[in-house]
Amino acid sequence: MQDIHCCVPNCLANPYAPAGTRSVCKDHFLNFLTWRRRRGPQMFHAYAGMAMEKRDTIAAEWMKTIRRDEIPAAVPKL
Ligand SMILES: [Zn+2]
């Protein structure tokens, strides 16, 4: 199934690249890449080898962070 718009809520830009099973626009795709890099090289490379369902989980996690992107997120260490 093809997306008509970027799958980020309230974004009406054209889809550019996949994020999980859905598509995001260029800006959001770059944002997603940056976010994954920030999570560390392990996450960055692990994503490439993940199954689609797992990627969707990561993409969903990322989408929750979009709105407060300007604020440096205090990432809780487990
Ligand atoms: Zn977008």
Image (cartoon, rainbow, N blue to C red):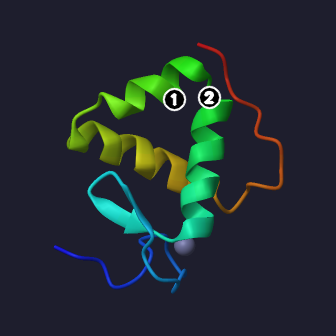
Farthest residue, direction right: 71
| Residue at image location 52% in from the left, 56% down from the top | 63
| Residue at image location 56% in from the left, 68% down from the top | 26
Q: How far across and how far down the image is residue 11, in percent?
A: 54, 80
Q: How far across and how far down the image is residue 5, in percent?
A: 41, 82
Residue that carries the numbered disc 2 in the rendered image: 39
Q: Amino acid at mark 1?
A: Phe
Asked which quadrant contains residue 76, the reply is: top right
Q: How far across and how far down the image is residue 6, in percent?
A: 45, 75
Residue that carries the numbered disc 1 in the rendered image: 44
Q: Callout 1: helix, strand or loop?
A: helix
Instruction: Confirm if mark 1 falls within 8 A of ligand 1.
Output: no
| Residue at image location 63% in from the left, 42% down from the top | 35
Asked which quadrant contains residue 22, the reply is: bottom left
Looking at the image, in which quadrant does ligand 1 appear? bottom right
Asked if marks 2 and 1 touch (Cβ < 8 Å), the reply is yes
Is 46 rendered above or below residue 7? above
Q: Amino acid at mark 2?
A: Arg
| Residue at image location 54% in from the left, 59% down from the top | 29
Side of 34 where 45 appears, left or right:
left
Q: Earlier in the sequence, mark 2 or mark 1?
A: 2
Q: Quadrant of the C terminus?
A: top right
Q: Callout 2: helix, strand or loop?
A: loop
How packed mark 2 is, by other alpha carbons closer than 10 Å (few <14, some 14-19, many 20 or more), is few
- Any mark on residue 64, and which? none
Give the alpha-carbon distance from disc 2 to disc 1, as whole Å.
7 Å
Is 52 rendered above or below residue 21? above
Side of 18 where 43 appears, left or right:
right
